[in-house]
Image (cartoon, helix red, strand yellow):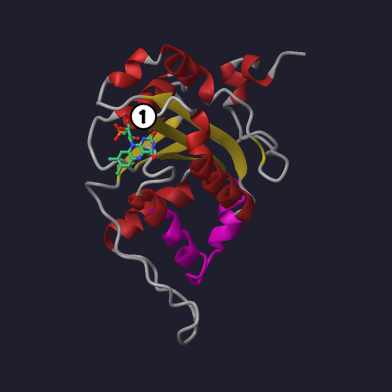
């Protein structure tokens, strides 16, 4: 029996693990650093380079297309949220269209950056937009994380990993896991050779049921 990461990539990518098959894979990379060309982004590029050419990739940079502030209106009036507009709508549509969501966020104070967190906060509103159920749509997708951190202690990223994993659980998504790499100044990630090597295999891992993983 081959290990999950040894399954030939072409088979692995025809359909999300556990699905009936036949779906094209489509990855949305949500870049959540506050700077361009940083370490998390570079690590994500390494991982994306290993995706087969027929897997669709969309990249969305939150610092260039910021989302609106999130407001909790769950207990105001009907509790419904209007359909998003502007950048929020672009991201809402891209999120719904993807089979795989990749949160590319550096470690800030042991957790996600503010823009990554804001993106997740908006999921709460999107679950209350009249029409097709956002939560049900998310249930067919896989959540992944890619994170650069300055510390060499990987456990410092546990709060970030826990946040993403619990979000995947809440949304009944599959859980791809978090790829960690070490770096402080932009470019330093390239010297973390184990992380770069792991990036090449990252998306070849079989996602797990988030309740089991
Ligand atoms: C506001 C802020 C908070 C940070 N907090 C942490 C932290 O808690 N732990 C850590 O190891 N590195 C921390 N760092 C360092 C970054 O994670 C590191 O520089 C990373 O490479 C930045 O990623 P980027 O190049 O993708 O932007 C922090 C950096 C900033 C600017």
Is 176 placed left or right of 118 in the picture?
right
Q: Quadrant location of the N terminus?
A: top right
CB at mark 1 closer than 8 A to ligand 1? Answer: yes
In magenta, the rendered stretch is: 119-140
Front residue (pair 98, 72): 72
Closer to the camera, 81 or 19? 81
Residue 185 appears in the rendering: yes
Q: Residue furthest bottom?
A: 77
Which residue is located at x 51 percent, y 44 percent?
159
Question: What is the number of callouts on the image?
Answer: 1
Disc 1 element: loop
| Residue 75 on image: x %, y % | 50, 82
- Judging depth in this view, the residue of 148 and 14 nearest the camera is 148
Residue drawn at x 59%, y 28% as measured from the top left: 14
| Magenta-drawn stretch contains 134 | yes
Rendering coords of residue 128 (x, y %)? 50, 70
């Amino acid at each position: 029996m081959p290990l999950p990461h040894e399954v030939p990539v072409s088979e692995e990518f025809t359909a999300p693990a556990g699905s009936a098959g036949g779906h094209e894979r489509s990855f949305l990379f949500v870049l959540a650093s506050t700077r361009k060309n940083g370490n998390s982004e570079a690590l994500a590029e390494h991982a994306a380079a290993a995706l087969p050419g027929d897997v669709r990739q969309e990249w969305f940079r939150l610092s260039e297309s910021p989302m609106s502030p999130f407001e909790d209106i769950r207990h105001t009036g009907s509790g419904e949220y209007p359909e998003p507009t502007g950048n929020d709508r672009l991201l809402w549509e891209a999120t719904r269209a993807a089979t795989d969501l990749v949160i590319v966020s550096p470690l800030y104070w042991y957790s996600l950056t503010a823009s990554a967190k804001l993106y997740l906060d908006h999921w709460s509103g999107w679950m209350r937009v009249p029409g097709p159920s956002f939560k049900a749509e998310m249930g067919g997708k896989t959540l992944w994380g890619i994170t650069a951190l300055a510390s060499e202690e990987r456990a410092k990223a546990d709060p970030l990993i826990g946040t993403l994993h619990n979000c995947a659980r809440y949304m009944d998504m599959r859980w791809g896991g978090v790829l960690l790499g070490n770096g402080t100044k932009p470019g330093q990630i390239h010297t973390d050779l184990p992380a770069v090597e792991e990036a090449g295999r990252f998306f070849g891992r079989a996602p797990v049921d988030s309740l089991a993983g």
